[in-house]
Image (cartoon, rainbow, N blue to C red):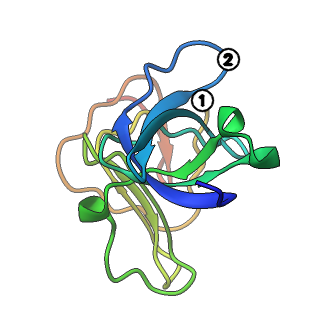
């Protein structure tokens, strides 16, 4: 394994304890530990069977870092240029930004803090309210 970068498969996901997220990976018949790169506040834990790109800073196997981690069978197919998505592959929750500018959210959504909506709002299904609701007719309670 003289290459400075190569592909590996996740054989054991992280137990996510300690200052760094560590996973066990296997490449070319060798199994070793790699540190997961978590960039710009984005956190993810590569899944068992996931394909990761391994980089070796200074060519040192003891410093191996992993990028990626989605199993090829779970990869989103047919993605258009500039589309961005995130998915929890176990629960199926999705945040996806389509090429037409729309945003798709799937799953239970909980917001802690203020939410401001500008534009039309369409609601289908049940609605539970607590507190004062203000709309174009002014403030009112449920």
Tell me where residue 83 appears, x and y as whole percent: 51, 76
Which residue is depicted at the point 69% across and 58% down? 4
Which residue is depicted at the point 39% across and 29% down? 141
Residue under label 2: 19
Tell me where residue 59 appears, x and y as whole percent: 75, 48
Seen in the picture, residue 49 relative to 23 is either above or below; the reply is below
Tell me where residue 104 appears, x and y as whole percent: 39, 63
Which one is in front, 70 or 102?
Answer: 70
Which one is in front, 29 or 51?
Answer: 29
Q: Is residue 113 left or right of residue 142?
A: right
Name the secondary structure under disc 1. Answer: loop
Residue furthest to the top: 18
Q: Is residue 51 left or right of residue 111?
A: left
The reply to whether residue 111 is visible in this rendering is: no
Residue furthest to the left: 125
Which residue is depicted at the point 38% across and 23% down? 130
10 Å crowding of disc 2: few (<14), some (14-19), many (20+): few
Q: Using the rendered view, name the quadrant where residue 17 is placed.
A: top right
Comparing marks 1 and 2, which lies closer to the viewer? 2
Seen in the picture, residue 90 relative to 97 is either above or below; the reply is above
Tell me where residue 40 appears, x and y as whole percent: 73, 46
Q: Is residue 29 left or right of residue 16?
A: left
The reply to whether residue 76 is visible in this rendering is: yes
Separation of residues labelled 1 and 2 (CA atoms)? 28 Å
Residue under label 1: 113
Image quadrant in which the N terminus is located: bottom right
Which residue is depicted at the point 40% across and 80% down? 79
């Amino acid at each position: 394994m003289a290459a400075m970068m190569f592909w590996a498969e996740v054989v054991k996901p992280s137990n996510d304890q300690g200052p760094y997220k560590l996973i066990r990976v296997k490449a070319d018949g060798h199994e070793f530990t790699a540190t997961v790169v978590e960039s710009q506040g984005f956190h993810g834990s590569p899944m068992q069977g996931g394909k990761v790109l391994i980089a070796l800073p200074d060519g040192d196997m003891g410093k191996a870092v992993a990028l990626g981690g989605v199993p090829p069978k779970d990869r989103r197919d047919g993605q258009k240029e500039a589309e961005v998505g995130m998915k929890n592959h176990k629960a199926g929750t999705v945040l996806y930004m389509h090429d037409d500018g729309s945003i798709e959210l799937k799953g239970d959504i909980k917001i802690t803090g203020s939410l401001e909506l500008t534009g039309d709002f369409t609601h289908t299904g049940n609605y539970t309210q607590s507190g004062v609701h203000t709309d174009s007719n002014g403030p009112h309670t449920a």
